[in-house]
Image: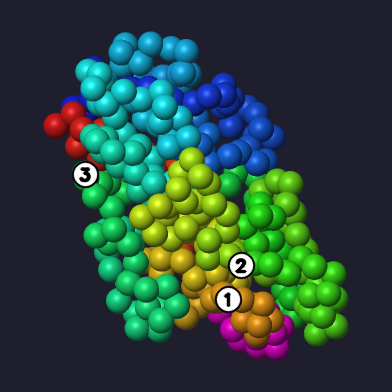
Amino acid sequence: MNNYTFKDKKIAFLCDENIPNYIYYPEKYNYITGKHSATAYYYWILKNFGFDNIFLVSEYDCLDDYDLVIFHYDNANCINVLKKYKTMQIVTDRPQVPNIDLYACCNLSVFNYILNTDLIQHMGVGLKNVLSGKLTYIPYPMTLNYKKCKASWPPKIYHFTGDSRTLLDGISSDVFVNHMKNKGVNLRFNFKTDETYGDEDVYFCVRRKTSYFSNKANGNNVDTKFGQITANRLYQSWKMGTPLIISPTSAMGAIYKSEYDFLIAGDLNELEYQSLRLLNDENLFKKMIENGNKRKDEHNNYTIVKHFVKAFNMIFH
């Protein structure tokens, strides 16, 4: 850190829970909420890379003791923009807080338009020009406890992890699950943790366009100015070694390079169609796994650290 402009600055990550280091307590990260991923998880990533001027603080600490406070929308009530410390908001599935010094966004479409005409039909041109203020890109932390898979064709297990409230209506119903089973597609759901088990052949995450609404945030988990969904499920599928079926979001469109990156499903009919494609097309299945293996290292903790360094230098230039 000797060559960085922020080496003598005290940087606080504001978190309302004392989340432990993932190296020693990985089980605590089986499911970690967004506001803690955006603060404590980031903190420990930087700490494990040797940053010694960062601190994990709570709402009960004196924020005036720090030069920069990094926070998530859900803890914005602790932030006073008139104080002497600088501020950085991690902007994911919540809106921007006004008058913040730097907004760290995890969706590359905030910075670059989506240009592929087929993708534009599904997800628009992205979120460039939707946000205001000083912006920087920082990749979002990956789910910790996923397993590398030995996916094989024809696929036997199609797996979902995540909050059941975000799913399209009817996907996990007995009617649809049995309908898909009769087609040869076995759907499995894990609503309790973000864990995968290593036996998955296909990973899927098909959500409502607006999965749930927060009166506090005036919006949630929506691909608009109210919030930016991350591309983490895509990165995870690449690292797991499985094809991915996913609902259309700008974060995925922003890193799209080929037809083998992911398959789009915005409703039950499209999920059935894409599931059967993978069941019946061995070449498609294997090409998607091969493609993911080539791209799987595009997201890692070192990349996160590099972008934090850039963000800190922007603030303390």
> Would you name the residue on which mark 1 appears?
265
Under mark 1, the amino acid is Ala
> Would you name the residue on which mark 2 appears?
206
Q: Tag 3 or tag 1, which sits nearer the N-term?
A: 3
Q: Tag 1 or tag 2, which sits nearer the N-term?
A: 2
Instruction: Using the image, determine if residue 200 lies above or below residue 71.
Output: below
| Secondary structure at numbered mark 1 | loop
Examine the image and state in which quarter residue 30 appears: top right
Q: Quadrant of the N terminus?
A: top left
| Secondary structure at numbered mark 2 | loop
Q: Tell me, what colour scheme is on the image?
A: rainbow
CA gap, disc 2 and disc 3: 32 Å
Under mark 2, the amino acid is Val
Q: Nearer the viewer, residue 140 or 51?
A: 140
| Secondary structure at numbered mark 3 | loop
Say whether residue 62 is magenta: no
**Quick one: which residue is furthest to the left in this view?**
317
> Would you name the residue on which mark 3 appears?
134
Q: Is residue 260 visible?
A: yes
**Mark 1 Cα shell of 10 Å, populated few (<14), some (14-19), many (≥20):** many
In the image, the segment drawn in magenta is 275-287
Mark 2 in CB contact with mark 1 (< 8 angstroms): yes
CA gap, disc 1 and disc 3: 34 Å
In this rendering, would 219 be left or right of 22?
left
Mark 2 in CB contact with mark 3 (< 8 angstroms): no
x then y, percent, for residue 161: 68, 55
